[in-house]
Amino acid sequence: MIRVRIPGKLCVQIRSGERGKGKGMTPTPRLGQTGHSSQKLLAPLLLLLLLNVVAAVSGDSPVPVSGFLGEQVVLPCTYKGNVPVSDLLVIWRTEKEEILYEFVDGNDDLAQQDPRFRNRANLFKGQLEQGNWSVLISDLRETDQDVYQCWIQKRVGVLFYSEQSDSVDLSVKGPGVTTRARVGLGIGIAAVFVVGIVGYIVLKRQRRKQNLHKMAALNGDPLREVTMHQDGAAGEQNLLGNGAAQH
């Protein structure tokens, strides 16, 4: 490599391939190798992202439950701990924090129950000690379609600490009822679609770069990169040549 300083504010750097054994110049392999290695790394990263999306959707998705208009439906919730019923606070609520049912200190506490659930929701009182905190909804309505959360907390002194949280996605079927789409499934499909599009675009660009490098190699033209910037003092011009310095 020969470095020549030329007075002025314009700096031009020209990188060319290393000199071959024969006549002419051969393209530097670095850029092509970089694109190839990037493509190798991209596939595992996209696969990992896709697996994380699927795991997140499947792992956190509410339990799907469906019922028929005007009938009864059970929203399941099983407590896996061993805290006595008298030391538990159990709240059934919607995503909008509308109270479906509340149980505390061994008794019902329906003071904050949403009016639309009045006299339509009940626990299985005889099975609470066995951990069955499922709730029964009667006279099912279209407006009952929602994601419900069974939130169980245990008493420690005068405070309650979260023990468990389960979600149930309720859909209602019947004449003239529009079934709400599953939230988790919709997010999962959208995420997979986005990941696929991004991966396709990136891979397409990588292949295009590789094809350009191959064409340059076949034509016998060196790959060059020219950078121009303002220096304020002097300009530098880096050349790869035949070993002779130019002034």
Image (cartoon, rainbow, N blue to C red):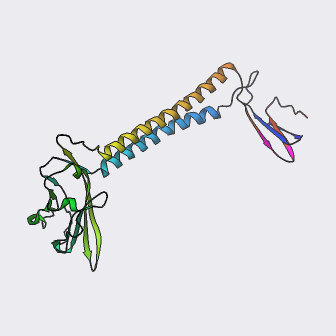
Question: Which quadrant, please, contains the N terminus?
Answer: top right
What residue is rendered at 33% in x and 47% in y?
A: 57
Q: Residue furthest top?
A: 219
Relative height, residue 237 to residue 99 (above, below): above
Relative height, residue 5 to residue 81 (above, below): above
Q: Nearer the viewer, residue 246 or 104?
A: 104
What residue is rendered at 51% in x and 33% in y?
A: 201
Q: Nearer the viewer, residue 245 or 164?
A: 164
Percent position (x, y) of residue 172? 20, 46
Quarter of the image for residue 54 reads top left
Relative height, residue 27 to residue 236 (above, below): above
| Number of marks in the rendered image | 0
Q: Residue furthest bottom?
A: 157
What residue is rendered at 21% in x and 59% in y?
A: 116
Relative height, residue 211 to residue 233 (above, below): above
Q: Nearer the viewer, residue 117 or 65?
A: 117
* Span shown in magenta: 228-234
Say if the magenta span includes residue 231: yes
Q: In the shown orientation, is residue 172 left or right of residue 218?
A: left
Q: Nearer the viewer, residue 104 or 69?
A: 69
Say if the magenta span includes residue 167: no
Percent position (x, y) of residue 154? 25, 71
Quarter of the image for residue 87 reads bottom left
Q: In the shown orientation, is residue 13 left or right of residue 245?
A: left
Quarter of the image for residue 221 reads top right
Percent position (x, y) of residue 35? 58, 34
Q: In the shown orientation, is residue 101 left or right of residue 185?
A: left
What residue is rendered at 16% in x and 59% in y?
A: 135
Percent position (x, y) of residue 145? 24, 50
Question: Which quadrant, please, contains the C terminus?
Answer: top right
